[in-house]
């Protein structure tokens, strides 16, 4: 009897340990899942997502704050149209593209980086559509991540011959308000350029080499390319 009790006690201990580990895994996964709006999410952020997508014609369901299949499909449609990662999850980049402030919008860049990027966007894309301003900021960040360019925002912007605005005086003009918002959206992951590392205005460009680059998309007066 004692041996059977001992075996039963050990089995019970193993079961308790397994249940505790399962609970820990569940809690970790839940906290990670709750950080993003996705299938099954509810609340004010989902309601705001639905409201905006409905206004823009991506979503035709009711604004009920429930992230169901119709909301997911609308998010996928929005992501595909705006050059975002198509996964049906409203993460920081997708929320930024919608103009929704996320609790996960810490970019990891300094205030100086932010201001410098905004100044570059203003100088290079002042007067361009807003999405085009974001795209210019995204090109700078794509270069930061690319092995062929400096690995910092300042390094990319001040690289010799990289941006004409540093030589024609535009860089030092007053920064447009929209450029600050565009810089924030780009830093939060919105990339309307589709991963471009170059862009140019075909009307004003005198660099014949740039015309050899594969074009990804055209936004406003700028062609964005690899």
Image (cartoon, rainbow, N blue to C red):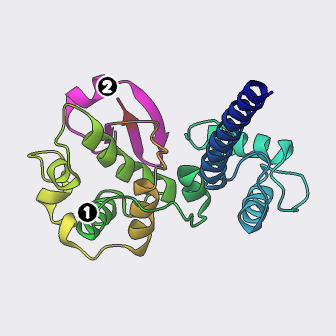
- Of 55 and 128, which appears nearest the observer? 55
Q: Residue at coordinates 57% horizontally, 55% vertically from top-left?
A: 97
Choose the circle earlier in sequence order: 1 or 2. 1
x then y, percent, for residue 51: 78, 63
Determine whether, in the image, residue 196 is placed left or right of residue 6: left
Residue placed furthest toward the front:
1
Q: Quadrant of residue 196?
A: top left
Determine whether, in the image, residue 65 is placed left or right of residue 33: right
Q: How many marks?
A: 2
x then y, percent, for residue 22: 67, 39
Magenta range is: 197-223
Reply yes or no: does residue 131 show up in magenta: no
On screen, 206 above or below 226? Answer: below
Q: Which residue bears the numbered disc 2?
A: 213
Q: Which residue bears the numbered disc 1?
A: 113
Q: Dot 2, how many residues are within 10 Å of its Cα: few (below 14), some (14-19), or many (20+)?
A: few
Q: Quadrant of the C terminus?
A: top left
Q: Residue at coordinates 23% horizontally, 53% vertically from top-left?
A: 153
Q: In 3D space, how far apart are the residues under numbered discs 1 and 2 (Cα atoms)?
A: 28 Å
- Of 216 and 88, which appears nearest the observer? 88
Q: Residue at coordinates 30% horizontally, 27% vertically from top-left?
A: 211
- Of 20 and 146, which appears nearest the observer? 20
Q: Quadrant of the N terminus?
A: top right
Closer mark to the observer between disc 1 and disc 2: 1
x then y, percent, for residue 48: 73, 65
């Amino acid at each position: 009897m004692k041996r059977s009790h001992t075996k039963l006690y050990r089995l019970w201990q193993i079961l308790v340990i397994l249940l505790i580990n399962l609970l820990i895994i569940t809690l970790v996964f839940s906290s990670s899942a709750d950080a993003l709006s996705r299938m099954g999410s509810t609340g004010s952020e989902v309601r705001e997502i639905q409201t905006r997508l409905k206004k823009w014609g991506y979503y035709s369901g009711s604004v009920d704050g429930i992230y169901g299949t119709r909301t997911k499909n609308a998010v996928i449609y929005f992501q595909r149209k705006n050059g975002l990662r198509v996964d049906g999850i409203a993460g920081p980049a997708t929320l930024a593209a919608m103009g929704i402030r996320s609790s996960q919008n810490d970019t990891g860049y300094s205030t100086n980086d932010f201001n410098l990027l905004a100044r570059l966007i203003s100088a290079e894309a002042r007067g361009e559509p807003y999405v085009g301003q974001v795209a210019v900021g995204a090109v700078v960040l794509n270069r930061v991540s690319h092995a062929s360019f400096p690995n910092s925002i300042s390094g990319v912007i001040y690289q010799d011959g990289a941006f004409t605005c540093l030589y024609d005086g535009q860089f030092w003009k007053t920064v447009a308000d929209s450029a600050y918002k565009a810089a924030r959206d780009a830093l939060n992951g919105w990339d309307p350029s589709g991963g471009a590392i170059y862009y140019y205005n075909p009307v004003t460009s005198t660099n014949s080499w740039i015309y050899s680059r594969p074009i990804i998309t055209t936004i406003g007066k700028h062609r964005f390319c690899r």
